[in-house]
Amino acid sequence: MPSKKSKKPSGGGIEREFILLESRIRDLVVLCQHLREENTSLQTRQGTLVSERAALIEKNESSRNRVEAMIAQLKSMETGA
């Protein structure tokens, strides 16, 4: 049975691995910065949408009340006629 020897990288191999690792870390830092910016943008957008939704709900409720008042007025006009 052949013995398995662990291959130890030579001095140049370790340096190359560190360079690759450094490059990957830089890529991750850039990605992290991009994701933070995107997250901030999405949070701002969500805040805007929540405000718009609240305004639309209020407008809808106001419209509903006006329509109900008009219906009540029409019904009272029918009974009075």
Image (cartoon, rainbow, N blue to C red):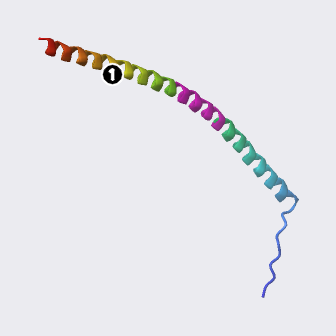
Query: Which quarter shows the C terminus?
Result: top left
Q: What stretch of residues is rendered in magenta? A: 35-48
Q: Quadrant of residue 11?
A: bottom right
- The secondary element bearing badge 1 is classed as helix
Q: Is residue 53 above or below residue 3?
A: above
Which of these two is toward me, 36 or 11?
36
Q: Amino acid at mark 1?
A: Arg
Most distant residue in the right direction? 11
Inspect the magenta stretch and tell me whether residue 30 lies in it.
no
In the rendered structure, the answer to whether residue 50 lies left or right of residue 24 reads left
Q: Nearer the viewer, residue 42 or 58?
A: 58
Seen from the viewer's position, the closer of residues 39 and 29 is 39
The residue at the far left in this view is 81
Quarter that holds the N terminus: bottom right
Q: In this picture, is 34 found above or below 64?
A: below
Q: Residues within 10 Å of mark 1 (few under 14, many from 20)?
A: few
Image location of residue 64, percent across then percent down:
33, 21
- How would you classify the magenta stretch by its main secondary structure? helix
Coordinates of residue 58 in the picture (x, y in percent): 42, 21
- Residue 9: percent from left, percent from top: 84, 63
- Could you tell me which residue is drawn at 60 percent across and 34 percent down? 38
Instruction: From the image, tell me which residue sits under label 1.
Output: 64
- Provide residue 75's location: percent of width, then percent of height: 19, 18
Q: Is residue 12 left or right of residue 26?
A: right
